[in-house]
């Protein structure tokens, strides 16, 4: 079927490549199940154009069909400009009614979701204006990079001004960046059959606080339905991968993926993100997240020594003011949906260290403001740094982050900061994008276990060191008295041999007693350490 032909059956829509020159009104008449969203359809495909249809790597599911409206550029290529979202069940129902009233087909989706039906991705993010020629060309390049498995090209496009343009394109690019290809580990097993996860109560508390800033203009019933989907996606991932430990703010990340991708695709995307991209944050302790934060002073030192020294009081021993932003990939701190979706374009296309570099760039963008605060006021500096400036020039910050990362790559950071990072940390396992795309859930679980054991050993050594210091402090005074007794005994022997007035036999007994007491103290100390 070519773009100029009519689709007679809504069930064939999953095989349509483009609707060509069909205008919005014509599309609505032929397919009343299509959501009545603004749609710019480009110039009609030339009637004489021939050649195979261009198959965009879309993620079609049983619950939602995403169709690109395309314009034929030549016989072999085309560019995607806009997408129309259609609920397959609604479309089929409309066809069965002989193309009945469009409002009837959309009634369920307007207020909530019927049992078993997934909500559409966030409609508020869909642009109502036509794409510029530059944006059209960029969309073509993005889809071509996905089709050709060209991660380097897609990374550059994601970092360039405007990122991946719009959500319809992101629905193709984000799963590609996250490696969501093929069947997943638990595809055939309902998540509800798995054992309850230990963190589900906290998940529900956080879900109740979700969708505060976006999407806009949705009814309470629809927002409740989105919260239900959010809870299901998070719970499904945690039950299927029980090693993972939920952290507060994880729901902020997941809600962005849910709004862009829809529930069906979001579940696989969240699972891969959790195990292969933000695994350090889902360990049993915060030690993994702290290793990310400790890179920040080294990055600042490499980029701006004066500013780094000025902030020393606030960054030592760990710059926890950056925890909220880096832990949630900035989803907790950025309130505009368009901004966080655009930032996710960049972060999902980058390695795990990039969010820390981005925070360093944000700090340096506030250089003058921070230098005006006295360095002896670390609490004031911490308060300023813990809040992101508004508004954020995301494209400018991303460009500077790219430049900083090229000038000061992780392995060249000062103070051997990179050498202190675990080999199992996502900071190191995400460095090669091609290797990352081939990693499996099993790889992520293996890295998780190895890093968790490594952290546990380090914690045990730290605890042993603290106990040793406490015992030394406790026995420091007796040890001083023992040393003084030994010194007196030595002096007594010396005077006894040189004809002094001291009795040698009495002082020999004192030395023997002092030695015995010293040995007893040492044995007691060793026993306390080993117990």
Image: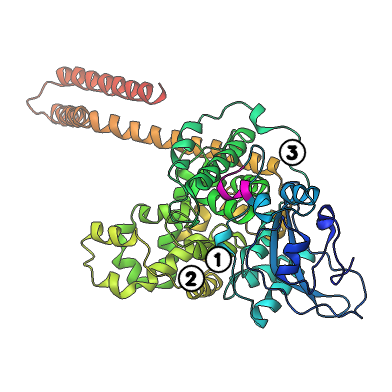
The answer to the question of whether label 2 and label 3 lie on touching residues, with beta carbons closer than 8 A, is no
Neighbours of disc 2 within 10 Å: few (<14), some (14-19), many (20+): some
Residue 32 shows up from this direction: yes
Question: Magenta residues, as a range?
Answer: 107-113
Residue identified by numbered label 2: 394
* The label number, if any, that marks residue 187 in the structure image: 3
Please name the residue that numbered disc 1 is placed on.
342
Note whether residue 411 is visible: no
In the rendered view, tell whether residue 26 sits above or below residue 430. Answer: below
x, y percentage for residue 374? 21, 67
Q: Of helix, strand and loop, which one carries label 1?
A: helix
Residue 238 higher or lower than 157, as above or below: above
Report x, y in % for residue 31: 76, 59
Does the magenta stretch mainly form a helix, a strand or a loop? Answer: helix
Q: Quadrant of residue 461?
A: top left
In which quadrant is the N terminus drawn? bottom right
Secondary-structure class at tag 2: helix
Residue 283 drawn in magenta: no
Which residue is located at x 41 percent, y 52 percent? 323
Disc on the earlier residue, 1 or 3? 3
Q: Is residue 521 left or right of residue 153?
A: left
Residue 168 x, y percent position in the rendering? 66, 63
The span from disc 1 to disc 2 (Cα, nearest Å) is 8 Å
**Residue 299: image x %, image y %?**
45, 65
Tell me if label 1 and label 2 are in contact, CB under 8 Å.
yes
Check the picture and name the quadrant holding the C terminus. top left
Residue occupying image coordinates x 29% and y 29%? 471
């Amino acid at each position: 079927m070519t773009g100029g032909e009519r689709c007679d059956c809504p069930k064939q829509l999953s095989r349509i490549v483009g609707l060509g020159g069909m205008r919005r009104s014509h599309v609505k008449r032929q397919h009343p199940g299509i959501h009545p969203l603004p749609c710019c359809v480009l110039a009609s495909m030339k009637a004489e154009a021939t050649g195979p249809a261009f198959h965009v790597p879309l993620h079609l599911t049983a619950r939602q069909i995403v169709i690109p409206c395309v314009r034929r550029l030549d016989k072999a290529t085309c560019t995607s400009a806009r997408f129309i979202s259609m609920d397959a069940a609604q479309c089929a129902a409309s066809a069965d009614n002989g193309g009945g009233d469009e409002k009837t087909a959309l009634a369920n989706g307007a207020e909530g979701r019927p049992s078993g039906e997934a909500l559409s991705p966030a409609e508020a993010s869909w642009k109502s204006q036509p794409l510029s020629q530059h944006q059209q060309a960029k969309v073509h390049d993005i889809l071509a990079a996905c089709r050709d498995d060209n991660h380097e090209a897609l990374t550059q496009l994601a970092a360039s001004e405007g990122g991946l343009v719009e959500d319809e394109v992101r629905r193709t690019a984000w799963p590609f960046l996250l490696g969501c290809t093929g069947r997943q580990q638990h595809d055939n097993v309902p998540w509800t059959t798995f054992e309850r996860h230990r963190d589900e109560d906290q998940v529900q508390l956080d879900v109740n606080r979700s969708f505060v800033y976006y999407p806009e203009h949705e009814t309470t019933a629809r927002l409740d339905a989105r919260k239900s989907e959010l809870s299901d996606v998070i719970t499904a991932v945690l039950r299927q991968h029980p090693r993972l430990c939920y952290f507060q703010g994880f729901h902020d990340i997941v809600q962005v993926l849910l709004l862009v991708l829809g529930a069906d695709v979001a579940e696989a995307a969240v699972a891969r993100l959790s195990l292969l991209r933000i695994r350090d944050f889902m360990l049993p302790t915060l030690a993994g997240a702290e290793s990310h934060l400790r890179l920040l002073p080294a990055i600042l030192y490499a980029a701006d020594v004066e500013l780094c020294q000025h902030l020393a009081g606030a960054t030592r021993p760990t710059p926890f003011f950056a925890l909220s932003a880096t832990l949630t990939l900035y989803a907790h701190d950025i309130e505009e949906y368009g901004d966080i979706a655009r930032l996710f374009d960049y972060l999902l296309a980058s390695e795990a260290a990039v969010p820390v570099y981005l925070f360093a760039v944000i700090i340096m963008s506030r250089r003058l403001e921070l230098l005006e605060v006295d360095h002896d006021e670390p609490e004031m500096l911490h308060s300023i740094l813990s809040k992101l400036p508004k508004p954020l020039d995301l494209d400018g910050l991303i460009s500077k982050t790219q430049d900083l990362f090229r000038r000061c790559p992780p392995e060249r950071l000062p103070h051997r900061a990179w050498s202190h990072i675990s080999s199992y940390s996502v900071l190191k396992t995400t460095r090669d994008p091609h290797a990352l795309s081939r990693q499996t859930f099993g790889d992520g679980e293996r890295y998780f276990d190895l890093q968790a054991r490594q952290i546990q050993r380090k914690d045990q050594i730290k605890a042993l060191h603290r106990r040793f210091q406490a015992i030394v402090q406790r026995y420091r005074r007796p040890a001083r008295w023992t040393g003084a007794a030994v010194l007196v005994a030595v002096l007594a022997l010396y005077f006894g041999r040189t004809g002094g007035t001291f009795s040698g036999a009495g002082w020999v007994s004192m030395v023997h007693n002092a030695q015995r007491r010293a040995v007893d103290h040492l044995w007691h100390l060793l026993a306390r350490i080993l117990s």
